Amino acid sequence: MKIKTTLGLALSLTALSIAAPACAADLVLYDALDFAAPVAKAFQAKTGLTVDVVEPGSTGETLGKIAAEGGNPQFDIVWIDGSAVMERMAADHVLQPVPAAAFDKIAWTDLGKSLIPQSHAFLPTGTSTTAIEVNTKKVKADKMPKSWADLQGFAGSVAAKDPNLSGPAYQWLAGFFQTNGVDAGKELLARTLTNKSLSGLSSGGKVNKAVLTGDASVGINQDSAIFSKIAAGEPVVAVYPSEGSVSLPQGLGISAKTQHMDAARKFIEFVTSADGQAAMQNGDDTDFFYIPIVKGVNPKPGRQTNIAYTHLDDTVASTHETEWKQWYKDKFVQ
Amino acid sequence: MVRTPDAAALAGGIGASGWAGRRLPALARLGGPAAVHAVFALLIGLPLALVLLQAVMPGLFAVDGAQGLFSAEPLIRVFSSPSVAASILHSLELGLLAAFTTTVLGGAFALLVRRCDIPLRGAMSLVPWLVFLTPSYLKALAWVLLMSSGGYLAQLGLLPPSLGASFFGLAGLVFVHTLSLFPLAAFIIGSALAGLGSELEDAARLSGAGPLRIWLRVNGPLLAPAIVLSFIATFAEVLSDFGLASTIARMSSFGVLTYGIYAAASDYPVDFPAAGAQALVLLALVVLVVVADRLLRRRADPHLISGRARPARHYQLGAWRWLVLAMAVLVAFLALILPLGAIAVRALTSTLGHGLAPDNFTLANLRAALSLNTAANDGLMRSLFYAGFTAVIASTLALLLSAQLDRSSAVMRTAVLGLSLGAVAIPGIVLGFGYILVWNRLPGFRDWPFPHYGDGSLLVMGYVAAALPYCLVVILSAIGQLAPSLTDAARLSGVGAGRRLLSVTLPLILLSVVTAFLLTFIRTVFELPMSQMLIPQSGPPAPTLILKLFSHDRDGLACAIALAAMTVAGGAAALIWYPLRRFVTFGLPQGIAAASGEPS
Amino acid sequence: MTASLHCAGISKSLGGRAVLSNLDLAIKAGEVVSLLGPSGSGKTTLLRGIAGLIDPDRGTITLGDRVVWSERSFLPVEKRRIGMVFQDYALWPHMTVAGNLSFGLRAQRLAEPEIAARVGHALEVTRLALYRDRYPSELSGGQQQRVAIARCLAARPALMLFDEPLSNLDAALREDMRIEMMELVRREAATVIYVTHDQAEAMAVSDRIAVMRDGRIAQFDTPRAIYEAPADSFVAGFIGGFSVVPGTVRDGLFSVQGVAADSLRTPGAKPGDGMLVVRPEDARPAEAHPGNRLQGKVLSSAFQGRCWRLAVELGPQRVRLDWPEAPPVGSSLAFSLPPERCIVLAN
């Protein structure tokens, strides 16, 4: 009996010791962005406030975790790609509106101003857009696609993300329908995405891989992902379609149940400051190649910003979301 | 039957201390099974129930307030969806095919290692263990690196494009599953072969039966339970696999159920009912196979390792042995060396596209994984630490439960073994999801301080749940091989339950307990779904990090972490295991040393 | 320290089959009692019930003046102070001989000098002192057996149970071991229950033998009394190679069924159908008891040292006889049985 008790005590004590350090942070951040960890580190160094950075994986996995937590969210701040999903979380009262004062303090660029949601569901911190990723080893310079419509010429060899699994991919799909028309767009896609093994990928990394390995000659991908590959010396280029691109803001949202409003406010302030923006560029991965939306901040070298944007009609996009996602799934996934 | 001490018994002249002495065993008698039930309910039953319940109560975890209304809507929706129907068919097709090929390969390998006089038998018998310990998603990622059209094999000109294309489909999945699961079949069939010995075979030879006849009429039927068990175990493993489902199957548009569950669960809002309904279908399939097997054979409990090893004669293969050895080496090469080599090469190069060009090689990835205070190194250390804890807890718990079970009825033992096998078949992703529901949504659990959702303690608990079935099977079979009189003798000598376990049972099955410990340790370092679902706020463990890096296209660093983790975990395991085996075997009769089911 | 044992009304079913039915057994302190019976007769179940390793369904078990098991109360195995020598010895393979002996004593928290004294004594009387630091796997079968007994002795139990302790030894060693073992037990004046299916072993070791059949005690008496007067044909058949021959008693004369010609004088036998018990050693030449003469045909003969053991056919029956010579197989043999040795059991 005695031995058992001792053993049990020892076990529970050691177990307690692993739990102890977990409860202390001032701020819990859920994210699926490469630069979140360096930013949190810089924030911690500057303010002394500790941040637990929780990255379950892709945006989808982060969203799944938030959804599973439901009415008992464990994060204080969420930082991900995609405006529509943030709006949905705000509508479900998982997020609370970001205080108006936070928006007013920032010197937004024109692009930045256009990204601020009316509901204040999130605060945009930067943006990116969708471009055509081309493998220069596979596609000669004179054969480069120039528009979404040109992709028909690469039918069967076009890699794309499944909008069901990727927020940015849905933004692209909705924007594409807006620029090319829903019916014409559907027909165009049906002619272009003829290889189901390439058209239902789950992340930008997989589109990159498909294009780099040559499984696909071109891919529809987030432009920052393409620039990070270019910076790494891979043989790819980013082509912006002549129809115009929809921007994909990265948004910071605040949990409706947060107990750390002060720290959250400080974090937002830091992210939009010069130090914070520098930290957001302190790395070589996809998200570090974002387009800054604060005046006076330059993007990482090599990052193209001279892009023809079109503004996405959020209402149309969210009205048709379920329908269009299902359509894509039935047509191009499996 | 609840009994209380009565006056007549007390009249025997024992004082107050005797009172407690009589009550405790009565409590232990009822408390033992209750504890077993409680452990299983908490670790596996409750989380699973919550996930499955969603299939019929879709409003249970709705954001705007829970509703406990029954509805068949999710099930109808799931069954009427063509993609779900296709994924059920895909899962079944893949499961049956892979179970068949795995059992054939594993059985052949077991026969080779146990009963043939091939050269390098010792080294060959180690191969299944090493393969078993390499996580399936790493192997899958390695095969993607190798087989994709710009991958290493294509770069080396070894892969005709047509083969590469057909690899990403059913054929490739069966191929990789077979190579990564054949150890399971080899263990099950190999231990049955060891228990069979060659006495019966010799008797048949004396009666004039030829080798073919012996295998068809004597050894075959006697090994049939092990073969069927191996088939079922691999079938369940394939059905519940997520590693390949999320890589090769996903890339081949070969949708399977586990990926369907994952896809339903990674969006906002999550389609809980669809996830629950698909999980229900998945479990129903596994349960159906196990039950069908029971009904067909009406046998006693499936002994994973039956009886003691009996002496066996080795077949003399003559010159053929070199050919057979070459085939075994080929299996080892494909299952182990090639995938690990691909990971190692990727870890040591900067881009995939530039392949094996000399200036592409770099130590930067490894340096990042191994230098202190990098995210990669933190993840690695965290995982080793969690895995160590999990291994201690899971093997201790399995030991306590096994000791308890060994004394309880055969029905209970069968039930727990069945439950353990069933639990192996539960996809980690479903269990992980259930853990979030239980520990973050259920009142009572939500505010419970320890373990608490979002910290390492719950992740360790999830790891324990995932590892416990394996530990139980290993330890229970070792205890089953101890003569019951050894513990009976200790009881009669007045030795209490705790001391009996520590001083009699534990030393005799130490090797098995350590095997369970190391197995848990290594598997936990790489456990993926729990790590993803229950990622602690203090930072991600290595598997989450590896997969995140892969999906963010930093596969070089991911491979470096994987390589470092495998080296550390494997090295630590070998350092513990080999000296211990030498030490433990000393002074023990052969039978007991051979009873622990380790590679010999 | 040694105690009496009383089992009353013990019943136990396993898997729906009654293994023990309403069994009573009383053993005096210091007595050596054998449980003898074929496999499946319930003797091991009874032994394990007494030890506490299984629980009976009904009844009471009293050790000395203390009830150790009843339907309402029980004393756990660990506290019963019962020692057991197992069929497979159950020596802990990872402990030395001395370790095996002292393990239980330490668990009972005896003082170290006391433990040393008991272990020393037990090793000395079992002549194992030289082997105290060896592991069981380094000992011969007979030595392992002695360690098992020494372990039992060192614990000074109130009751010692032997579960077919000699069955794993070869024939040559078995008798020596038996004599040595019983010497030890007698010297310690222990109460002993000895389970065996070997009647010769039971006869040799026991004060009394309980012959068991189908979960009941068929006869419980001294070896001699059982030998002289088996209670029924089952006991007679199980003991000592007796032959049991069916027939009919009329006017004090027994006629073997199917053999009309011969009949035997069986004084005191009840009229009607019965079974004649024929002990092999009772066979006499035909002229010794001319009124009790039987004629049969020799089927086989086996040399047994002092005599030949013959199988003789009496009509449809067979009997075993000890005979000073070996008649050719197939020849006819006439013999007689002393009337006072002819016991007829009722069917």
Image: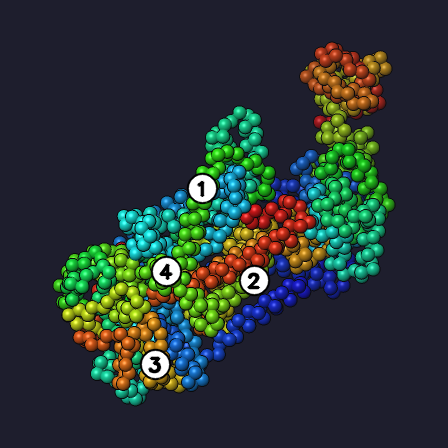
Q: Earlier in the sequence, mark 2 or mark 1?
A: 1
Of badges 3 and 1, the one in the foreground is 1
Between the residue at mark 2 and the residue at mark 1, the CA separation in whole angstroms equals 39 Å
Q: Is residue C291 above or below residue C64?
A: above
Secondary structure of residue under mark 3: helix
Q: Nearer the viewer, residue A228 or A132?
A: A228
Residue B182 in picture, x, y percent from top left: 44, 47
Q: How is the image coloured?
A: rainbow
Q: Amino acid at mark 2?
A: Val
Secondary structure of residue under mark 4: helix
Residue B23 in picture, x, y percent from top left: 67, 61
Q: Amino acid at mark 3?
A: Ala
- Label 2: which residue? B392
Mark 4 and mark 1 in contact (Cβ < 8 Å)? no
Between the residue at mark 4 and the residue at mark 2, the CA separation in whole angstroms equals 44 Å
Q: Nearer the viewer, residue C246 or B50?
A: B50
Of badges 2 and 3, the one in the foreground is 3
Q: Is residue A56 above or below residue B111?
A: below
Residue visible at 44% across and 61% down in the picture? B562
- Label 4: which residue? B358
Tell me: B141 left or right of A311.
Answer: right
Of badges 2 and 1, the one in the foreground is 1
**Subunit under mark 1:** B
**Subunit under mark 3:** A
Residue B91 in picture, x, y percent from top left: 35, 51
Tell me: B11 left or right of A280.
Answer: right
* Disc number for residue B326: 1
- Label 3: which residue? A278
Q: Is disc 3 in the same subunit as disc 1?
A: no
